[in-house]
Image (cartoon, rainbow, N blue to C red):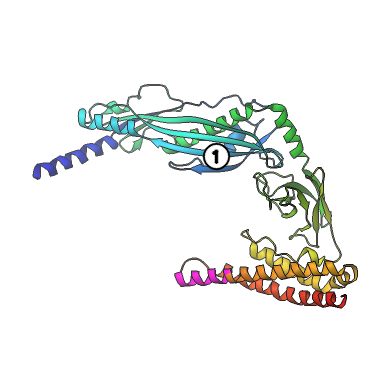
Amino acid sequence: MRNRQVSIGVTIFLLAIVFSGCTSMRYTSTLKPSADRSLQFGSARFTIAAFTYEKPGIQPIPPVIDQKAMILYPDIFTNDRTALPVHVDIKRTYDDFSYQVSAFLTGFCTLTMLPFPGTQKHGFTVNAKVMDSMGEILLEKETCFEVNKVLWSCALPLGLLPVPGPSDLPRDYVFFTTHLNEGDDSFTKVNNYAAECIVEAVARSIGSAERARLEAAYLQRQSSIQEIIVDGRKCWGFLALTNLARPQPGSTFSLFVYQDHPSRTVKTIDQAIVARLDEAGRWQPVNGYLRHSLSLTSVSALMENNVPVKAVVRTPDVPPIEDFIDTPDLSGADRAEVLRWSNAVLLDAKNRSMDRVFRDETRDTLLRLATRIESSILELSEQSERAKDRAQAKVQKGEGDPAPDRELSILCRQRMEVLKPILAAIKQEAAVRQ
């Protein structure tokens, strides 16, 4: 038993020496980034708009990839909103079996006196998709490559000799825990280099596509930007899919409003839905409203060949009550703010537009409005109860802040209290017209 304990102690000591001794590292990739900063593919420009990742491994930070793309290829990538969006899906693998074998050989075959090289393999699979203005895929291509860190370590200064082979990046040398050269941590270096290789993979994928098709889609996307007037001042409006994905029934087009020329570094000052895809696959215009304008401002879309092509901005004198009967979208983080604003406009519409509704609308239209109001009340009641249950569960479990759900529940009930007298008045008017 004593001999076994001594053996375990010696093993631990030897491994500690190996992993904290003298180390040399080099880096290579099977996909080399180009140094051609003037590379371009016609007039089309692209923006890396979305990322998804699959572990394991430390992931390259998305903004790093986006920034590196514009630095490496300024004539291909941009942050302009009118550029064609590129979705990048990254899967990563990690294999250090070769490195473990080298550590075993160094530690147990040479007693840490002679180093054996081993490799840590970082594998990447990059899927690049280029989308057009309607969410259709113009290009989808997958590229695989490896970024390898080759290193050896031993207890003697021999470990500081350059590990054999070429290196795409400056080599690293470690004397026990001290880096002998200035530079990033090796994991950071691998990730930064991987980011450049990912950009290269995306650029090569774009270069393999039909250029004329990309340029036509780019020109169409550029036409989605226009000057608009909001509260008497000039703004920029950008008409685009609310979510960057292939449209499904229920998908929406929105007008995004900017104070300056739209880019991904400029925040929107407002946005509103102007069209929605129905079950038959046709885009139907809807009246949206800008929540942050000083005066009530409606926006809608002009359609051409079943495509929203231009935004129309109006300032109605009286809020049309039919535009505020349905419950607004409460899926965003600002749902309380959205509902509070919509409740206030609904209340104003109740007091100012009911006479017009009774004067201009037929009995059938009144009955349809009544049905919409009843459906909205049922939906609001369900939303309120669910929000209240979520708040109570958070209190009981002591997990999370119940205040947002309580606020949402209260706002839903407030909206129901505004809708109920509207419903009663419409039903009464419809009954009189029998």
Residue 273 covered by magenta stretch: no
Asked if residue 121 is positioned above or below residue 292 in the image, the reply reads above
Q: Position of residue 430 (x, y in %)?
A: 84, 74
Highlighted range, magenta = 386-397
Residue 325 in view in this figure: yes
Q: Position of residue 106 (x, y in %)?
A: 25, 29
The picture quadrant where one finds residue 128 is: top right
Q: Position of residue 142 (x, y in %)?
A: 55, 32
Q: Position of residue 358 (x, y in %)?
A: 87, 72
Apparent side of residue 103 relative to residue 338 in the rendered image (left or right): left
Q: Measuring 25% from the left and 29% from the top, which residue is drawn there?
A: 105
The picture quadrant where one finds residue 245 is: top right
Residue 396 covered by magenta stretch: yes
Name the image quarter holding the N terminus. top left
Amino acid marked by disc 1: Asp
Q: Measuring 82% from the left and 44% from the top, which residue is drawn there?
A: 304
Name the image quarter holding the C terminus. bottom right
Q: Residue furthest left?
A: 2
Overall secondary structure of the magenta section: helix
Q: Which residue is mark 1?
A: 89
